[in-house]
Image (cartoon, rainbow, N blue to C red):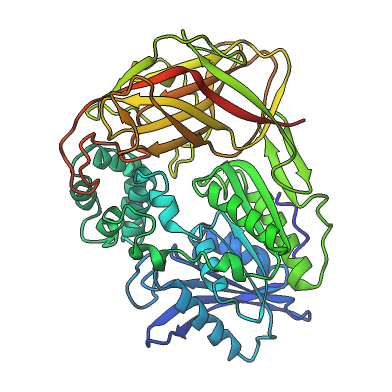
């Protein structure tokens, strides 16, 4: 089913304890291939989610059965490992100490690789901040290197994803499988309910209880340059890694921008790097994306660690084009030309420059914030969704093109340039591009979000040009469909609503409405169109 080579080895599994420099011991499972054939290499996997299914299957069993020794470790404070779990803070030191332990083992042959997804990807970047000489390759699936950018990169806290993640992390070791399963089924509703309440710091704490001690710290550091975030980002790794790196992710993954940044940075440095981008959300990577991820991971390990070269990729970049299928190219993004579509009075979208007219306006009410529908969410509600209802809301502006006469392939980051003003300087702007089919149903393609506090021209008759770079896409708009641009003042609960008062996200509770205006003339979207 996964298109992997046949199993070559049996293997044993035993638990081991690894001492860290401060005396704390971390637990790991050691998968040891057995039989006449020697192991072909060692894999290190470090994460906070336990050593059982699905991580034991995807990152240990599949590879141990094909000749790789695997060390699957629970990070500090999780699933039997000593110490206190503080997300990301200890991964640089503990990763280095784990490699030091491996060096002392009689079975270690002096070479290893790292693999893993999400937080298991962050632990790889943490190790690459000071790369061990024995490291031969890495396979990083949707792994961030800078948590501050994911939490506060838009200027608004990414509340759905990281309150939801904190809730999961705080309760993942609760006893009782049935009770834990029921809690998981209710988790998203609980997160949305907490995000609806104010102040957000207190409502989040009420959900999390005494666990997830990091919650308020994340909320109270809204500036990505705040020294607080230094231990939660490992940006230097991008300048220090020299081994071959395979990056895998999805167009609807919450860490998409960082994966593309990683690829472009390593490519520009001349590091051997490859990229695979599928149509998945973060949650779908080990479901719909499992076959692709397992096969490409195994091929990369065989080529760069196991001495069993796999069939080479025909292109350094392999990506899924919505409306078309898989493509392989030498690089990302491919060559494109710019197509400009102007927002038109009356809700149109066209290539012709509109005549001046009264601006379009909407009122954003933080008491009833514009809802999130689809997108790069860490929840079952994420991904490509029917967002027709969003376009019909009174607090959303909708601009729709005529039906396309030919397919329109778009590769890269669309850009929105809006001439925008507001009667309140404390506002957010959300822009989305969707595709409307022949039956009038709309589905999201890409979007962008930004907090404009202090930069919007409150009460200005001319407005201020706001430029937003939307998420990168590979999408073929089909002939007969229409392109739709949505403009709103929020996307709740994906992002913490703007209260309209300038109060801190963690403690604020006063609400103030805002009227947005989008002025016609040069308000437009720019599409990178390929072939």
Q: Position of residue 229 (x, y in %)?
A: 37, 63
Quarter residue 300 falls in:
bottom right
Q: Is residue 34 above or below residue 319?
A: below
Residue 389 visible from this viewpoint: no
Tell me how many marks there are: 0
- Residue for point 53% across, 23% down: 524
Q: Position of residue 394 (x, y in %)?
A: 34, 15
Towards the viewer: 153 or 122: 153
Quarter residue 466 falls in:
top left
Towards the viewer: 479 or 139: 479
Quadrant of image for the C terminus = top right
Q: Is residue 306 above or below residue 224?
A: below
Q: Position of residue 328 (x, y in %)?
A: 77, 44
Towards the viewer: 397 or 82: 397
- Residue for point 36% across, 72% down: 77
Q: Position of residue 434 (x, y in %)?
A: 54, 24
Residue 486 visible from this viewpoint: yes
Judged left or right of residue 503, residue 244 is right
- Residue for point 39% across, 51% down: 151
Judged left or right of residue 262, residue 521 is left
């Amino acid at each position: 089913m996964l298109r992997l080579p046949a199993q070559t080895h049996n293997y044993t599994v035993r638990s081991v304890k690894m001492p860290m420099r401060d005396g704390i011991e971390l637990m790991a499972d050691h998968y040891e291939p057995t039989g006449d054939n020697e192991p072909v290499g060692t894999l290190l996997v470090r994460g906070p989610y336990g050593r059982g299914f699905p991580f034991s299957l995807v990152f240990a069993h599949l590879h141990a059965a094909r000749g790789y020794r695997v060390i699957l470790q629970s990070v500090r404070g999780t699933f039997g490992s000593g110490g206190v779990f503080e997300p990301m803070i200890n991964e640089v030191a503990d990763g280095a100490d784990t490699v030091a332990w491996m060096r002392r083992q009689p079975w270690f042959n002096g070479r290893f690789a790292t693999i893993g997804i999400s937080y298991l990807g962050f632990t790889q970047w943490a190790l690459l901040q000071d790369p061990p000489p024995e490291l031969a390759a890495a396979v990083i699936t949707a792994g961030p290197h800078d948590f501050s950018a994911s939490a506060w990169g838009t200027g608004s806290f990414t509340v759905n994803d990281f309150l939801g993640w904190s809730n999961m992390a705080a309760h993942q070791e609760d006893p009782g499988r049935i009770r834990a399963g029921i809690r998981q089924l209710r988790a998203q509703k609980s997160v949305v309910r907490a995000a609806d309440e104010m102040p957000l710091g207190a409502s989040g704490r009420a959900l999390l209880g005494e666990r997830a001690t990091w919650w308020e710290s994340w909320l109270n550091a809204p500036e990505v340059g705040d020294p607080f975030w230094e231990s939660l980002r490992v940006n230097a790794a991008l300048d220090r890694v020299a081994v071959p790196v395979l990056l895998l992710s999805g167009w609807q993954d919450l860490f998409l921008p960082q994966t593309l940044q990683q690829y472009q940075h390593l490519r520009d440095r001349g590091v051997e790097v490859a990229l695979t981008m599928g149509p998945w959300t973060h949650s779908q990577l080990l479901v719909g994306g499992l076959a692709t991820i397992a096969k490409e991971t195994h091929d990369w390990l065989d080529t760069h660690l196991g001495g069993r070269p796999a069939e080479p990729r025909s292109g350094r970049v392999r990506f899924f084009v919505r409306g078309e299928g898989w493509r392989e190219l030498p690089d990302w993004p491919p060559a494109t030309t710019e197509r400009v579509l102007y927002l038109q009075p009356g809700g149109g979208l066209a290539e012709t420059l509109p005549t001046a007219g009264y601006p379009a306006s909407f009122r954003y009410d933080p008491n009833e914030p514009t809802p999130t529908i689809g997108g790069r969410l860490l929840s079952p509600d994420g991904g490509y969704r029917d967002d027709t209802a969003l376009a019909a809301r009174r607090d959303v502006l909708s601009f729709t093109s005529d039906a396309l006469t030919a397919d329109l392939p778009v590769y890269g980051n669309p850009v929105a340039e809006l001439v925008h003003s507001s009667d309140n300087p404390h506002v957010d702007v959300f822009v989305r591009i969707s595709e409307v089919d022949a039956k009038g149903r709309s589905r999201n393609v890409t979007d962008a979000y930004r907090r404009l506090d202090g930069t919007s021209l409150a009460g200005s008759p001319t407005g201020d040009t706001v430029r937003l770079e939307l998420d990168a896409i590979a999408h073929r708009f089909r002939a007969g469909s229409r392109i739709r641009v949505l403009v709103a003042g929020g996307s709740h609960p994906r992002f913490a609503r703007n209260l309209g008062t300038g109060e801190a996200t963690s403690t604020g509770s006063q609400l103030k409405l805002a009227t947005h205006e989008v002025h016609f003339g040069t308000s437009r979207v720019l599409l990178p169109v390929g072939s």
